[in-house]
Image (spheres, grey):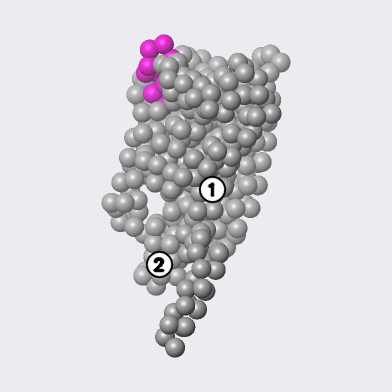
Amino acid sequence: MAIILALLFGSLLFLPFGVDPFKAYSTMVELGFGTLRGIGYTLIKATPLIFVGLGTIFAWRSGFFYLGFEGTILIGAAAAVWIALLTDPEGAIGPLPRLLFLLLVFLVSFVAGGIWAGIVGVMRGKFGGNEVILSLMMNFVALFLVNYLVSGPLRAPGDLPQTPRIPQATILDFIIPGTRAHSGILLALFAAIVVWFVLRKTTIGYKQIVAGLSPSAAWYGGINVGNRVILAAFIGGGLGALAGMVEVLGVHFRLLDGLGEGTGFVGIVAALLGKLHSIGVVIASILYAGMEVGADVMQRRAGVPSSVIFVIQSLIVLFILASDILRYYRINLSKLFGNDRGKKTLEVDSST
């Protein structure tokens, strides 16, 4: 229902450009999902969103409302590029077997992102800091740190602030012929299964969810809430860092200034649309990615700004939050229009 309402209100945005909303939406779907090339680009955009969404699930289900995924993406990307450059034939480590490299870059990126978010987790879990403010500020720290790296010690020769291209042997495989869709999407789907299993079928997941739903009840039940928060920060940050890893190993092949800008927040939105469920996050991420791919092509063909799609995405979140508020307070149309009061009056009159 939230998606339908957002599309209805969003259709008004096409009218000033003289574009039929129905044709615009059908074209968007066709370009994002109707061709092999479009599907490939959709999967490319969806992959980092899935990782961020999974990180959001683990953190938010644990009561740790982390908003620092913009930063963890950059940290994960920087760690992945660092390992890739070390395994260059002229690097400090030298070439590694492909499987060993993938395991190494996965672990280093995950741990780097986990430690980065873990700083906020410790501040919240041990000292009662506000994770929302702290994580937002850490985004800027990561941004300036990466800016320093690509402009200084890791800068490649040339005018652009970027690192050298990573070795060809470290690039993720393309999985759909004729497209640039890479194997990172398979890793994202596997991660979704793991997150679902951990949260739903293990003792660790049970403790995380209990600590998130009721910290006081968890405390009386012998669960150390502070440690649960730190673990949520580490796992959530690690998953977010994998989004940066797949971006540099599968798309850009180098660390860039401003890499993944906006992906962290859109991934959080995808998690909300997916109701903080692993399957829902995968579906929502693919939906959002397809909308963005279709909007980009539509901008070139019809002159409609691609920013329109971000407004529609925001409307989807707005209506989801509104429906949750209405459900929480048990507000319905009869109460809004005072029908309950009239009903009670009739019941009193009939009883007398």
> Which disc is residue 218 wearing?
2
Q: How many marks?
A: 2
Q: Nearer the viewer, mark 1 or mark 2?
A: 1
The tag earlier along the polypeptide, 1 or 2, is 2
Query: Mark 2 belongs to which amino acid?
Result: Ala
Q: Is residue 338 above or below residue 2?
A: below
Query: Mark 1 belongs to which amino acid?
Result: Phe
Region in magenta: 173-184
Which residue: 66% across, 14% down? 157
SS label for mark 2: helix
Instruction: Residue 122 in the image: state x and y as whole percent.
Output: 53, 55
SS label for mark 1: helix
Which residue: 53% across, 27% down? 22
Q: Is residue 320 visible?
A: yes
Residue at mark 1? 319
Q: Is residue 236 visible?
A: no
